[in-house]
């Protein structure tokens, strides 16, 4: 009976997260730090895979990777509500359902993109060998195999509908 009582006591202490000793608190802090490092490495690997998939024109793979990142980060719709419409002098980018975006340009042409990365600085869109980043004041583009880095695409910004 004492063994059962001891096991129940240990289980209760473990579930209560009562880390009263310095060693237990240090072990918990180290575990959480290691977990953050591993998650950050995995997110970096996902970002690299998304760029490669976008360069190869694998839109479905970009969307799958985005969903995995959102799941990992505990997010559903990662795009803030105020970042739905980005206008520039020749047209606009507008968020559609399910993480897709449409670009409309002056002549009526439309390009469909998949949202691949969302952070506080920019939203990144992917489309068959092209990456576009929408910043608060500009957009930048990277063409696979042609550019060594992102280049200015348009001056513009986020607007309310």
Image: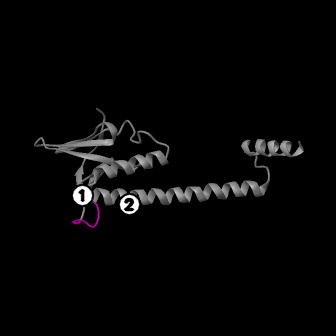
The tag on residue 48 is 2
Judge whether residue 71 can be spotted in this image: yes
Relative image position of residue 104 (x, y in whole percent) = 18, 42
Residue in view at x 21 percent, y 66 percent: 146
Against 23, residue 72 (above or below) is above
**Quadrant of image for the N terminus:** top right
Q: Which segment did they paint magenta?
A: 145-152
Label drawn at residue 94: none
133 or 17, nearer to the observer: 17
Q: Classify mark 2: helix, strand or loop.
A: helix
Which residue is at a point 38% across and 36% down the rendered structure image?
A: 81
Q: Where is residue 124 in the image (x, y as percent from the top left)?
A: 33, 51
> Predominant secondary structure in magenta?
loop
Asked whether residue 124 appears in the rendered view, the answer is: no
155 to 150, vertically: above or below:
above
At x 38%, y 41%, the residue is 79
Given the current orientation, which residue lies at the most extreme top position?
A: 161
Along the line of sight, which residue is nearer the eye, 149 or 40? 40
Give the labeled residue for mark 1: 129
Query: Along the horizontal axis of the image, is 75 left or right of 153?
Result: right
- Alpha-carbon span between mark 1 and mark 2: 14 Å
Sooner in the amino-acid sequence: mark 1 or mark 2: 2
């Amino acid at each position: 009976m004492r063994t059962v009582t001891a096991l129940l006591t240990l289980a209760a202490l473990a579930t209560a997260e009562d880390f009263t000793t310095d060693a237990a608190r240090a072990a918990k802090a180290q575990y959480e730090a290691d977990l953050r490092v591993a998650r950050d490495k995995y997110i970096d690997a996902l970002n690299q895979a998304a760029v490669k998939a976008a360069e190869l024109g694998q839109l479905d793979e970009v969307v799958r990777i985005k969903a995995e990142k959102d799941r990992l980060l505990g997010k559903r719709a990662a795009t803030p509500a105020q970042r739905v419409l980005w206008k520039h002098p020749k047209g606009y980018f507008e968020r559609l359902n399910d993480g897709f975006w449409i670009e409309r340009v002056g002549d009526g042409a439309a390009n469909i993109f998949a949202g691949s990365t969302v952070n506080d600085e920019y939203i990144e869109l992917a489309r068959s060998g092209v990456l576009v980043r929408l910043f608060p004041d500009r957009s930048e583009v990277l063409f696979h195999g042609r550019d060594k880095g992102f280049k200015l695409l348009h001056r513009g910004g986020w607007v309310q509908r």
